[in-house]
Image: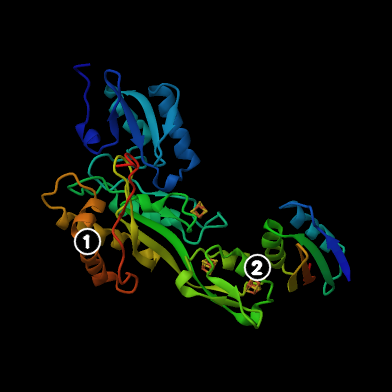
Amino acid sequence: MADAKIDLKNLKAGGFIKERGKDLFTVRLRVPGGRMSVDRLSRIAAVAQKYGKGFVHLSVRQSIELININFSDFDAVVAELGEDQQKVASCGARVRVPTACGGCEYNPNGLVDTQKSALAVDEKLFGTDTGHHKFKVAFAGCPFDCPKSATNDVGFQGGVWPALDAAECISCGLCDKSCTVGALGMGEDGKPVFAADKCIYCGDCLKVCPTGAWKSAKEGYSVRIGGKWGRNPLVGTLYATFLPEERVVDFIGSVLAWYLEKAKGAGRVRIGDIILREGTASLLDHLRRDFADYVLERTILPQVIDTQLPLR
Amino acid sequence: METIDLRGVSCPTNFVKAKLALEDIETGTTVEFLLDDGEPVKNVPRSLKADGHKLLGLKENGGHYVLTLEKGED
Ligand code: SF4
Ligand code: SF4
Ligand code: SF4
């Protein structure tokens, strides 16, 4: 196909991944937070039908991948998908499409609006060149953490700080029974006693209380930094709590700024490995400049999970 | 006081049964529900509260729970 006119800017935007076969590519479509309108879904289905091999693949990071697309069809595929509303996803050393669970909108466990956060991050930061390595962000609606937020470069987990209105309590003891981490006990007066240092902000007490005696004193994200999976997995650790939803984009921006500066000259290295090299204090100090109300006093290094050679 | 035994009835059937039972009861009347421990006692009381009934008490009693509530406006 020597005469095919390929718009190379489509290629540079990423999202086109070489397959095994000659001239064949996978086209990865971004689906921030895993939510997609049915209209877009039908449009994608039509394009996949016309140019693909009769199936699509759902990536583990919630993207839809069109399989077996011939590179000579790139421009037609992009045009027919409706370029403005269906941009292809990123690859390479960039901020990737954020993943998210359903969040609080319809999921009874959700404590924060993860979908809104994923869209905000996608809009403001998607594709930002990190200069070093890929950068993944995920949002979990609550500490059940189905999206495994701590395995991302920056992972957000919704949380709530419980406060008791003792007058509304009917002393049923359900909150005490439901708190799996032992942050609640029943006092002599028949009302629950709260051990703040054990609380993981899951909100189970609020959800189970039949009278609504437990209220939310504040809500927001617990933020973990430095995670990744792959050949040398790291689990990210806690840097901030109760970060308000509207500060999420700025917070990631601040983490990126630190990463870009500290990783200078280090090559293709993820932020978790930079933290292992630099220590946690420098990142904590950096974040404290703009997020003093939410950043922790101290934290621990990313946790190495030696999945490859456990007996080494 | 009327007692509605919902032991052995799983979620969400127990909640639907409780709703149906409350339809035949006058507003302001106090009724008692027997609920299994576990999911039933975690779900049914707060769902009934969300429907506008007033929870008066919830006590454990030999392996199950006794929920006392006052029927709210229809
Ligand atoms: S993380 Fe929480 S809110 Fe999100 S899907 Fe899991 S249980 Fe639901
Ligand atoms: S929020 Fe979760 S951990 Fe904290 S007291 Fe309530 S049930 Fe326990
Ligand atoms: S669940 Fe609510 S009513 Fe029951 S003991 Fe706890 S605070 Fe009191």
The response on whether ligand 3 sits within 8 Å of label 2 is: yes
Residue of label 1 = A279
Residue of label 2 = A174
Asked whether, in this view, residue A46 is left or right of residue A252, the answer is: right
The first of marks 2 and 1 along the sequence is 2
> What amino acid type is highlighted by mark number 1?
Gly
Viewport quadrant of the C terminus of chain A? top left
Viewport quadrant of the N terminus of chain A? top left
Q: Quick check: do tags 2 and 1 share a chain? A: yes
Quick one: SS at disc 1? Answer: loop
Whether residue A70 is situated above or below residue A82 in the rendered picture = above
Q: Place residue A239 in its image quadrant.
A: bottom left
Asked whether, in this view, residue A262 is left or right of residue B1, the answer is: left
In the displayed orientation, state which residue is furthest to the front.
A311
> What amino acid type is highlighted by mark number 2?
Leu
Check the residue under mark 1 and report the chain it is in.
A
* Mark 2 vs mark 1, CA separation in Å: 42 Å
| Observer-nearest of A74 and A148 | A148
